[in-house]
């Protein structure tokens, strides 16, 4: 059964340097790292000490607020470094990988006969839970609350992001297992959304509600899809998963092995040969970055896509949830009369002597320049043109800024994640940090209302 | 070392200093800054506030140039009489006319920007924030909505009042409740009413020469109508703008061109413009209807204005200018798309109403816009309520699962 969704509001950001659809095997990384910022809101409690040996799939720390929620190591090796920040907060865990990888093989639950509780505790124990995120708050799911539905977006509209149709090829078995497992955890439906004309591996999967979506970015964001299919209300809970994480979840359920292998798109105008690489969570980015080569000395390396990713560097590691690594030029240079002369080489949502509207298909080479300074909100009505959710974006942002909890709730903060505001942030004339504002708003709401 | 590097060194030198905002304002005027993204999206679209404001200024330039020529045209026509057979190049676009514009309009522009920007810089330095671009448009609007001979000291005082009380006390650009340009206009109107209305102020030297043998005057179309007298201008004069009035407001043609540019460039809201025009037409039709129905005796002091063809309200006075350039101010207008329809409609509606019912000062658009500025947040409030109500309605059918604790299990066994 499939339903068609058509998104009209939005903006496609076409950039040069899309990954070519070939997969190369990345050089094996020596050191793997887990960046704790990837697990927003989790306070880690270490299970092993620096210098201890650990096996792949063995728990390395747990969630302080929920001792059953374990986070596991992607590889076997030695925990060589615990990088700490202010107030001894753990930032990064670095593991020196063994030459021969040694996996823990967990005893798998029976997907046909075991109940939800058994599957839940299995996922919590074996590190699979980290892949399940919840809304409200856009954090790792609270295992004590049953979701009303689970949403998966198997369609990517973000600039230069990995194409799920390509990366999921041949993974039907794992996906099916993940769906079977997840379906025990909710009495509601599992909504999967694919592109309208895609040949998604999800088309043959049983036990899901398949939706087809078309239109510009953010059609591929799960938040857009939730809003169109079954929006989150106050008190409700939905889960979201990315399809590539479902493959890992599925393998964990089928074989009992936490296989951190992942196909990653290396893209961006700085990359000489943008293409896909097979590597592992936490691997050094340099292990595949230099295989493709770079055009410039100074560039911005991003874990994720250019709209929602996090800044990293050439010594950085692949993030826990990322399947795209993007490299674009840094834009820390001045431009003479840049604010009033006609612009042909940048994307704009207006036509104020900006000419990207003439060639909507043209691919641009954008850098990290903000193209202007931070200002108070002035212009109105622009965000709505790229924001398809039934929410007033400007009003919600302002409610978050003034920390008006009632207003934040009423205007629908429960329904959104920071990434839903990435496009409004992109076009913002006042250069306001939308995603940060929403993140802080969500954290505040969670803290105050629990 | 090129200018770019020199300025970069200077910027580093000023960093953290008191004068940094003033330097940065000049620096970013010359060069778009080297700032890169730190959080959220790593790439950003090409538009910033400077570009947005610049687009509005570009749309205003034709009105300004026309106003400069018109200052001379009205001046000489008042002295020598209007030409019998009007020719654009012989009578209007002449150096003589332009020179009158240079000596009267240009000083207004210079004082407007000089005083306004000085205050903006002062506040930026005192409060330690960047100089924001809001005044770039205000500074251009103000000279265009006042009579040509407004004394410069008067303008300077009004601007100081408008910028400080109208904007800075609320926190600067983006925070103000009332349109700053109209606040300045309102201050001038209420503080110096004799300089803002009557039949002398609209023509250069009209006030100076009053009472002498060389006295000249030029009444605006609305002024004539308010007094129940006839006006000597044809409809095409009014549309093209060869009539007395505030500096930049007379040419409906150029205002329409500006409007089309602003709508095409997506800078100003077409919703506000369309609904304001609709509102003005609606009110005009109602008045025309009252006259046609014979409810109003001809000796009524409202008769001439009520009988004025409803659509011609749009080509006289400042209504068109106000709708295109002032009502569309995003900060003081309604912020929701739905709200913009109501907001614009009432501006048009009230403008014509004030015109007709206020013979003492027949220009209602600035009062209507200021009034609706005050009501804009209320309109938005009710529009946003609609969204909240929709969400609350959904909430009634929310699917909330209790925590799967013993309670649920016991319920399960009960139902089983």
Image (spheres, coloured by chain):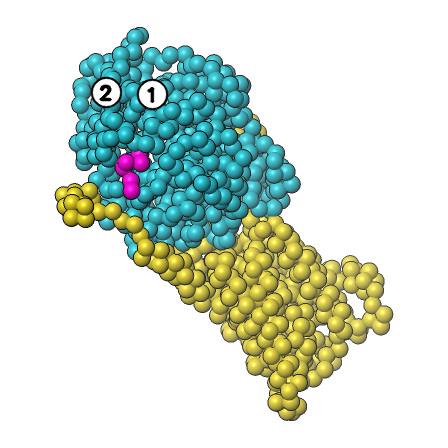
Chain colours: A cyan, B yellow
Quick one: label 2, few (<14), some, or many (20+) residues within 10 Å? some
If you read the primary sequence from the N terminus, does the residue marked by circle 2 or circle 1 appear first?
Answer: 2
Start and end of the magenta stretch? A182-187
| Front in this rendered view, residue B96 or A10 | A10
Residue at position x 65%, y 56% from top?
B260
Mark 2–mark 1 distance (CA, rounded to whole Å): 15 Å
Label 1 residue SS? loop
Q: Chain of mark 2?
A: A
> Could you tell me residue A171's position as x and y percent?
41, 24
> In the displayed structure, does residue B103 sit left or right of residue B30?
right
Mark 1, residue position? A260
Question: Which image quarter holds the N terminus of chain A?
Answer: top left
Q: Quick check: B282 above or below A213?
A: below
Asked if disc 2 and disc 1 are in contact, CB closer than 8 Å, the reply is no
B143 sits left or right of A145 in the view: right
Marking on residue A106: 2
Magenta segment: does it hold B25? Answer: no
Q: Residue at x 67, y 60 (%)?
A: B256
């Amino acid at each position: 059964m499939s339903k068609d969704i058509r998104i009209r509001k939005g903006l496609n950001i076409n950039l040069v340097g899309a990954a070519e659809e070939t997969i190369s095997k990345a050089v094996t990384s020596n050191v793997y790292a887990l960046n704790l910022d990837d697990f927003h809101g989790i306070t880690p409690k270490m299970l092993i000490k620096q210098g201890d040996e650990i096996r792949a799939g063995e728990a390395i720390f747990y969630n302080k607020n929920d001792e059953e929620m374990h986070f596991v190591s992607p590889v076997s090796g030695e925990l060589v470094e615990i990088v700490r920040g202010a107030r001894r907060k753990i930032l990064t865990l670095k593991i020196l990988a063994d030459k021969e990888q040694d996996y823990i093989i967990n005893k798998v639950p029976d997907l046909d006969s075991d109940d939800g509780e058994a599957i839940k505790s299995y996922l919590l124990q074996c590190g699979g839970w980290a892949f399940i995120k919840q809304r409200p708050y856009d954090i790792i799911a609270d295992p004590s609350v049953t979701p009303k539905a689970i949403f998966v977006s198997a369609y990517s509209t973000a600039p230069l992001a990995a194409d799920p149709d390509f990366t999921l090829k041949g993974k039907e078995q794992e996906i099916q297992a993940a769906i079977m497992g997840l379906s025990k955890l909710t009495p509601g439906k599992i909504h999967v959304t694919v592109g309208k004309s895609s040949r998604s591996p999800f088309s043959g999967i049983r036990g899901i509600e398949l939706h087809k979506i078309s239109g510009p970015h953010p059609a591929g964001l799960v938040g857009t899809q939730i809003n169109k299919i079954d929006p989150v209300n106050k008190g409700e809970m939905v889960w979201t998963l990315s399809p590539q994480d479902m493959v890992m979840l599925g393998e964990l359920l089928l074989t009992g092995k936490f296989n951190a292998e992942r196909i990653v798109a290396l893209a961006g105008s700085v990359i000489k040969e943008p293409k896909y690489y097979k590597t592992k969570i936490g691997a050094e980015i340099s292990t595949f970055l230099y295989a493709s080569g770079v055009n410039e000395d100074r560039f911005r390396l991003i874990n994720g896509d250019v709209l929602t990713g996090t800044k990293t560097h050439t010594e950085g590691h692949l993030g826990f949830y990322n399947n795209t690594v993007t490299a674009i030029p840094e834009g820390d240079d001045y431009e003479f009369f840049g604010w009033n002369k006609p612009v042909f080489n940048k994307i704009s949502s207006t036509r104020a002597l900006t000419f990207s509207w003439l060639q909507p298909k043209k691919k641009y080479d954008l850098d990290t320049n903000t193209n202007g300074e931070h200002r108070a909100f002035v212009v109105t009505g622009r965000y709505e043109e790229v924001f398809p959710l039934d929410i007033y974006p400007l009003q919600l942002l302002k409610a978050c800024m003034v920390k008006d909890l009632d207003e934040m709730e009423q205007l629908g903060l429960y329904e959104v994640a920071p990434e839903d505001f990435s496009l409004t942030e992109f076009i913002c004339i006042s250069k306001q940090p939308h995603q940060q504002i929403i993140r802080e708003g969500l954290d505040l709401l969670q803290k105050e209302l629990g | 070392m090129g200018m770019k590097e020199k300025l970069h060194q200077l910027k580093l030198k000023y960093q953290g200093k008191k004068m940094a905002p003033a330097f940065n304002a000049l620096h970013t005027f010359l060069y778009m800054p080297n700032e890169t993204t730190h959080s959220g999206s790593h790439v950003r679209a090409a538009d910033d506030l400077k570009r947005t404001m610049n687009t509005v200024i570009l749309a205003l330039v034709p009105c300004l140039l026309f106003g400069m020529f018109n200052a001379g045209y009205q001046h000489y026509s008042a002295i020598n009489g209007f030409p019998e057979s009007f020719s654009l190049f012989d009578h209007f676009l002449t150096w003589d006319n332009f020179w009158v514009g240079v000596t009267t309009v240009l000083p207004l522009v210079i004082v407007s920007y000089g005083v306004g920007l000085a205050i903006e810089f002062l506040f930026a330095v005192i409060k330690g924030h960047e100089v924001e671009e809001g005044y770039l448009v205000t500074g251009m609007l103000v000279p265009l909505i006042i009579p040509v001979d407004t004394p410069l000291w008067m303008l300077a005082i009004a601007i100081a009042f408008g910028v400080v009380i109208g904007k800075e006390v609320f926190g600067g650009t983006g925070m103000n409740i009332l349109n700053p340009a109209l606040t300045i206009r309102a201050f001038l109107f209420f503080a110096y009413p004799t300089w803002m209305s009557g039949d002398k102020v609209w023509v250069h030297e009209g006030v100076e020469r009053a009472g002498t043998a060389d006295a000249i005057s030029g009444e605006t179309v609305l002024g004539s109508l308010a007094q129940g007298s006839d006006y000597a201008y044809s409809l095409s004069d009014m549309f093209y703008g060869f009539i007395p009035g505030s500096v930049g407001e007379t040419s409906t043609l150029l205002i329409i061109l500006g409007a089309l540019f602003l709508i095409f460039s997506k800078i100003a809201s077409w919703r506000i413009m369309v609904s304001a025009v609709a509102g003005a037409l609606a009110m005009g039709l109602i008045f025309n209807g009252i006259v046609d129905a014979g409810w109003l005796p001809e000796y009524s002091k409202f008769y001439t204005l009520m009988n004025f063809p409803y659509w011609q309200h749009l080509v006289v006075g400042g209504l068109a200018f106000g709708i295109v350039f002032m009502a569309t101010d995003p900060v003081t207008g309604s912020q929701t798309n739905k709200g913009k329809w109501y907001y614009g409609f009432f501006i048009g509606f009230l403008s014509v109403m004030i015109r007709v019912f206020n013979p003492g000062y027949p220009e209602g658009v600035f009062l209507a816009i200021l009034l609706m500025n005050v009501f804009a947040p209320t309109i938005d409030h009710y529009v946003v309520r609609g969204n909240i109500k929709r969400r609350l309605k959904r909430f009634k059918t929310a699917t909330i699962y209790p925590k799967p604790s013993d309670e649920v299990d016991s319920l399960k066994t009960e139902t089983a």
